[in-house]
Amino acid sequence: MNKDFQPSRSNPMDAAVPSSFQDTEQVPRERSIGEIISEANNLSPEQIERILDYQRENGVRFGEAAVALGLANSDDVLWALAQQFHYPYANENKSAIHPELVVATKPFTDQAEAFRAIRSHLIMKVYSQEDGPRPAICVISPNSGDGKTYFAANIAVAFSQLPGRTLLIDADMRNPRLHEVFRLSDRAGGLSSILSGRAATKVIQSVEGLPNLFVLPVGPTPPNPLELLERPAFGLMLRELKTKFDRIIVDTPAASLGTDGAVCAAKCGAALIVARQNQTRIHAVEQLSRVVAMGPAKLIGSIVNEF
């Protein structure tokens, strides 16, 4: 992508975005809890028959019978229930997803519930507006180690568990981590490839086990990250992506490393500050707020990270 990029049938984003976005969504076939548990645990016909016998003799559900016989555990049953109710999350023992993604691997914990509460507030404050285009949400923080990437990744997972497509962009071209958190390859290119006008094909990658979540990694780490973000191409790219995704979350470098976060916020339209409890200084948050206020972005709130 270069500075003359304009949304069109031949723009670079057509190659960067998977063609499956044009597919018509299909209603998945309803499966029973027993079928899901049996497939997930590779149960043999003999083991299934044992479970059914126990179920009939004791008047319990299939999942309870499987747990009682030691052929499944409670996490397997919760995962099966989530599958039946079309609630995507990754069973920690069966997925390659990083355990840092607590909303995906431990969706029934207090940590995951906190992210769902924040998601509800963001929906009311950002996505319930009917007039004008929806902004992308830029996640910023004063210092490294505030938990900004941890927050951005988990809130993106939380949004992906709702109908619609969620895109998570790694704009931290100084110390990128999202490709590691989601165990994605960044060799095919990424944000830096698009903004520098280099060839990039299908750099937006899907996440295993989370069908509504997509990630645009950084790609090769450039020597001039701030200059790339300040190019018109970044804003034009976001405008194009907003037509293909329902929600966009952008991760950025800490403010202590440069003004990348403030520049991203101005292009995204909305900013959310993440601070770490008992570590982040109040004056650092106030200073970052003042910098964001200099641009057109709306500061929609701040998050105190306890973890």
Image (tube, rainbow, N blue to C red):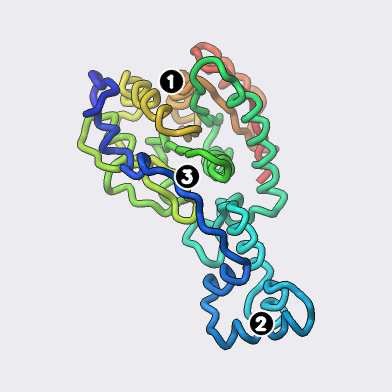
The residues bearing labels 3 and 2 have C-alpha atoms spaced at a distance of 35 Å
Q: Quadrant of residue 161?
A: top right
Q: Amino acid at mark 1?
A: Lys
Q: Is residue 204 above or below residue 125?
A: below
Contact between marks 3 and 2 (CB within 8 A): the answer is: no
Which structural element holds mark 3?
A: strand
Q: Considering only order in the chain, which callout, 1 or 2, is on the residue closer to the N terminus? A: 2
The residues bearing labels 2 and 1 have C-alpha atoms spaced at a distance of 56 Å
Q: Is residue 286 above or below residue 196?
A: above
Residue assigned mark 2: 51
Query: Where in the figure is residue 201, as x and y percent of width and height?
Result: 25, 42
Which structural element holds mark 2?
A: helix
Mark 3, Cα crowd under 10 Å, few <14 / some 14-19 / many 20+, is: many
Residue assigned mark 3: 213
Residue assigned mark 1: 267
Q: Quadrant of residue 169?
A: top left
Q: Amino acid at mark 2?
A: Ile
Q: Considering only order in the chain, which callout, 2 or 3, is on the residue closer to the N terminus? A: 2
Q: Is residue 157 above or below residue 272?
A: below
